[in-house]
Image (tube, rainbow, N blue to C red):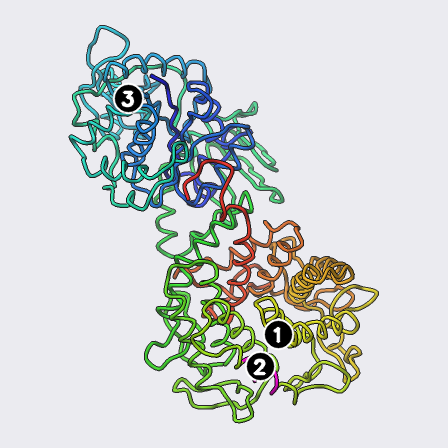
Amino acid sequence: MAIYPVIMCGGAGSRLWPASRPAHPKQFLPLVGARSMFQETVLRVADLGEAGDLVVVAGVAHGELIAAQLAEIGVSATVLLEPEPRDSAPAMAAACAWIAGRDSEGVAVVVAADHHMPDGAAFRSAALTAVDAAREGQIVTLGMRPDGPSTAYGYISPGQGPGPVRPVLAFVEKPDAATAQAYIEAGYLWNSGNFVVGAEVLLAELDAFAPAIAQAARAAVGSCALGQGALAESFRTAPKISIDYAVMEKTQRAAVLPVDFAWSDLGAWDAVWQASDKDEAGNAVRGDALMVGASDCLVRAPAGLQVTLVGVKDIAVVADGGQVLVCDLASSQQVKTAVDQLKAKGREAVAPAAPFQTLSQAAVWFDQWLKTSALPLWWTLGADHVGGGFREALTPEGAPVEAPRRSRVQTRQTFVYATAGLMGWQGPWRQAAWHGMDYFLARYRRPDGLFRAVVSNDGEPLDETAALYDQAFALLAMATLNQADPGHTDLAGEGQRLLAALQVMRHPAGGFREAGDHPFQANAHMHLLEAAMAWAESGGGLEWQALAAEIVELALSRFIDVEGGFLREFFDETWAPAPGDDGRLIEPGHQFEWAWLLARWAARTDDADCGQAARRLYAAGLRGIDAKRGVAINALNDDFTVRDANARLWPQTEWLKAALILEQDALAPAQALARYLETPARGGWRDRLGAAGAFVEEPSPASSFYHIAAASLGLAGVGVLKGSRTNACK
């Protein structure tokens, strides 16, 4: 009868906001010591079983975070990742079904990942006592002897028995203060939520009292190879219910082992303060804090933030991810109420936890945001399903904004959904991509083979300008959709015809002229290079490789300053820097975007000079990062003085793409980008961050989706989306 430690990693810990967020809940935070609560729990329970017997049950979003934290402490585990949280009964059932499939006599020691038990030896001794009772068929919970009345815990009324393990007379919910005092006087115990039970015993009780849970759990692990623990989609069919309601309040096997070692579920900031080391004034401080006449306070401050407390007592100050909490420690339980109100107003940063702890965590979050929120939102509400094509914008609440339709929006959205298909999105990517492409080909084509700039909501021409910039995005959309879904339309032929039509825009000194006030510019060439590379990389003819090589040479010889290594935006007809302020403009986002393209070209051609240029451009882009806000700003001058301190969304995506391909620190740009994605309608974005740190309240422009999708594609190469070092569920 082997022992299998089981760690339950559910729960969001909203009472520990703002440090605890859904993407990075409290069990993965170092609330008391240097290690996270999850890591402390692993080290406390691992020795109860043999190597490899540890089982972790968690949500799919936390798989890579768990892998990273296990690796940090050198422990391996089977990780059962739930496709959807269904509460403690289905989670325990899945763990026991996995154990029973390996060892029909196995005993599970089930603990929460976020509990504080500083005396690990005392816990293990109690667990082994409970294991003996579990081997006799009892379902044993650990009942903590209270050190005082508390309204934060449920209670257990123990009966009498011949040994240390006693029958349970009743489970009761969290009481009010007076009732809690009465429970203490009557000898009740705190319900710790830790259980020791034979795997087959729990499954049999579930068969009797909650058969749908047992059935879903067995099906969820039934197709797994031994030791892999992959939870199938059938897990979603399990009723969402706690183990107390599903089994413990109904079974005749419920038992409790009273224990009196130190324990806390760290359910609120007052509990964290109580468990933390304190100075002589009773203050528990982590981070840069000055305490003047302050006592019995808790402070949690991130790097770079100075906190000062003067003449206060019994308060918590917690800053994390751009949010600050100040509360009376006695009112810590009310933090959840405040979080609920912030969420209702769309102000609780419900997108990512901040900051991401690992790049793989960021990759998982962006992949889920893209596939479950953004792609569905912009297809259902961002597309015109009556007149055709895509709309220009959505409000932050998700309402469509009607405006004349630029060709670049149609081609960019086509690119987005074709890219989604290449990334394996299971939604209607093909339908969405062709919705955009068919509308574009029907409404924007001019008689000369080029494409106009703008049509009305009814599809009537409004602006006949054929911008090189717009033709480049037409070619990019064609190349990407042709790769994702070849054969529907002759997109290769369309691309060839457009390339031929572009020759009228050729400039005698090399490159192409752009329409409008700046005919000699780097930006339009950048996107033409991106399109040419897309065709070359997906099997297009040699003409695409030649076009890409021509633009790369123009960039290396003309666009990029030889001495400074940075890229200018505007030029004269000889491709010398334009006179005046136009020639001095440097956009950090374009330094990153060109770095990304040139790094791709260097990898394709083994061009060392091109690779060196990419790295110099990346370094130039970093000079446009505002350390205070953690974002790439809009514009610099050629002496690197600030020209425009505002920060749009798209430079953050280009910073991220360049960091990924050049193997630089990509966590910072991932976090910067994530801030823009915190909108009431999940799947939208903010476009402009002001110099003072506030976002401009305005609709989400559809054109930004191209940038976000390309950055998400880069993140998809991070290992978390291809597997992990644990036996995690896929």
The Cα–Cα distance between marks 1 and 3, rounded to whole angstroms, is: 65 Å
Among numbered discs 1 and 3, the one appearing first in the sequence:
3
Among numbered discs 2 and 3, the one appearing first in the sequence:
3
Badge 3: residue crowd in 10 Å (few <14, some 14–19, many ≥20): many
1 vs 3, front mark: 1
Badge 1: residue crowd in 10 Å (few <14, some 14–19, many ≥20): few
Residue holding disc 1? 541
SS of the residue at dot 3?
Answer: strand
Q: Which residues are magenta?
A: 495-501
Q: Are the residues flagged by discs 2 and 1 in contact, CB closer than 8 Å?
A: yes
Kind of residue sitting beneath label 3: Gly
Q: Which mark is residue 496?
A: 2
SS of the residue at dot 1?
Answer: loop
Q: Are the residues flagged by discs 1 and 3 in contact, CB closer than 8 Å?
A: no
Among numbered discs 2 and 1, the one appearing first in the sequence:
2
Quadrant holding the C terminus: top left
Residue holding disc 3? 198
Asked if residue 63 is among those painted magenta in the image, a careful observer would answer: no
Residue furthest toward the top?
162
Which residue lies at the image location 53% right of the left edge and 91% below the top edge?
A: 464
Image quadrant in which you'd find residue 285 = top right
Q: Which mark is residue 657?
A: none
Residue 191 rendering spot, x and y as whole percentages: 29, 24
Query: Above or below — where is 404 with respect to 248?
Result: below
Horizontal arrangement in the rendering, residue 198 relative to residue 693 (left or right): left
The Cα–Cα distance between marks 2 and 1, rounded to whole angstroms, is: 9 Å
Query: Above or below — where is 323 with respect to 140?
Result: below
